[in-house]
Image (cartoon, rainbow, N blue to C red):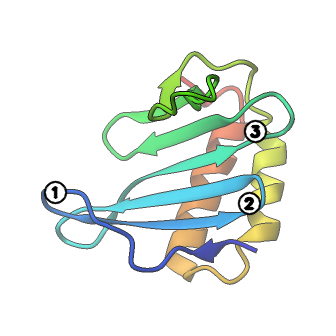
Amino acid sequence: MLQEIKNLKQERGPGSRRWFESEGFELVVWFDASDRISGFQLCYDLGHGEQALTWRHDTGFVHTGIDQGDESPRKNRTPILGAPQVEPPSALLVTMFDERSVGLDSTIRQLVHDRLSEYAVPSIRP
């Protein structure tokens, strides 16, 4: 089950974010100044290195890989988004999200489910 990370430090500027995690799965949801969902990022690792599927209200979807920046034991850098290592398993992400999101706020759960389902249909994907 996705559990919310409490007392999350908020970024500067209008709006806010909420962060949820479960093993191998993270969801960050961004809200605008009116408290409407403006985007989300679903991070997952299915044995191919960590990946991120990001949706923003104004730009749509972007799929990226995540470079953890910790390949050296002497230096840990900030993780950065880069080229994806594999094509996202879209239908599997919908199923995994549905299984792990039972306890989420219904507005968040429905929006993320709907957007992931849209992404899973290849003819709709940009």
Residue 9 at what x, y percent from top left? 32, 67
Kind of residue sitting beneath label 3: Ser
Q: Sequence-wise, which precedes: disc 1 or disc 2?
A: 1
Label 3 SS = helix
Packing grade of label 1 (10 A; few <14, some 14-19, many >=20) is few
Residue 101, located in which quarter of the rendered image?
A: bottom right
- Which residue bears the numbered disc 1? 12
Task: Name the amino acid type tagged 2.
Answer: Phe
Do the residues under discs 2 and 3 have CB atoms within 8 angstroms? no
Q: Earlier in the sequence, mark 1 or mark 3?
A: 1
Q: Residues within 10 Å of mark 3 (few under 14, many from 20)?
A: some
Camera-side residue of 83 and 56: 83
Query: Which residue is at 63% across, 46% downward?
Result: 43
Decide: few, some or many residues near mark 2? Use Cα within 10 Å; few <14, some 14-19, many ≥20: many
**In-front residue for pair 95/20:** 20
> Quick one: 42 or 38, which is closer to the camera?
42
Q: Which residue is mark 3?
A: 90
Residue at left 77%, top 69%? Answer: 100
Which numbered mark, 1 or 3, is in the foreground of this view?
A: 1
In the picture, the disc for residue 80 is none
Residue lying furthest front in this view?
Answer: 74
Which residue in the rendered view is the most extreme toward the left?
A: 13
For the residues labelled 1 and 3, the Cα–Cα distance comes to: 32 Å
Q: What is the secondary structure assignment of the residue under circle 1?
A: loop
- As drawn, the label of residue 97 is 2
Q: CA distance from mark 2 to mark 3?
A: 11 Å
Amino acid type assigned to the residue bearing label 1 in the image: Arg
